[in-house]
Amino acid sequence: MARALTLILVAAVGVFAAVPAFLAQSRESGRLFYEMVVTNAGTRSAGWNGTLYDANGAAIEIAPGATVETEIGTFAMHACTTPWTPCGMLRQGVPPQDAPSIDVLTDTRAWEFRLYVIAEGSRSQGWRGELRHGDELVPPAGDAVETIMGRFVPQGDGEFLWDWSGWAPDGWTGQ
């Protein structure tokens, strides 16, 4: 019985050791700071919505046109007037109209970007971006990815907490 338990434990440890770094990072603690989600994927009404979260995890709600200053830039509230336009909290300096002109009807799986702040408030504070396509986490390796929300570029591998890792919208990190 003890030998069987030991083998199960060894097998389990082997499985966890083989998890790629980007998947392990998605399990790390960190506070959800921001997310962009494609709405009405695969239709002519496809758009996206940005949400900025406060330190308690609540969505920040402000009047259209108002702004919020953050450590990674200024976010402005854009009214959600039609389903096919970008709306919600969008980072200034990266205008929604800069999104690539791609055929939204060919991709029925929604894109989602989540940005987490890691080790918040410490000298090791950093940022980790996750990019999802449908239900799949997109590994941050290789080339940039074009989405309806714009271009996303892979960042560092998360070796250091105080840096960017995972994905980031093009132009957000200066890399």
Image (cartoon, helix red, strand yellow):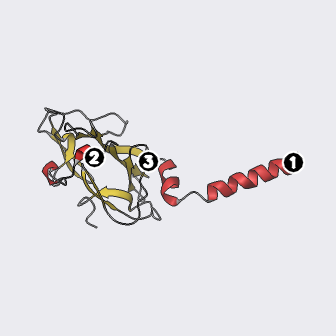
Q: Amino acid at mark 2?
A: Thr
Q: Residue at x 27, y 46 (%)?
A: 106
Which residue, given by chain and number where applicable, does mark 1 sit on?
2
Which of pointers 2 and 3 lies earlier in the amino acid sequence?
2
Direction left: furthest residue: 65
Direction front: furthest residue: 106
Which residue, given by chain and number where applicable, does mark 3 sit on?
136
Q: Where's residue 154, x and y in %?
A: 36, 62
In terms of image quadrants, where is residue 142? bottom left
Q: Nearer the viewer, mark 2 or mark 3?
A: 2
Cα–Cα gap, marks 2 and 1: 55 Å
Query: Which structural element holds mark 1?
Result: helix
Query: Which structural element holds mark 3?
Result: strand
How crowded is the residue under tag 2: few (<14 C-alpha within 10 Å), some, or many (20+)? few
**Res. 104 visible in picture:** yes
In the image, is 155 to the left or to the right of 42?
right
Q: Residue at x 11, y 39 (%)?
A: 65
Q: Residue at x 33, y 42 (%)?
A: 110
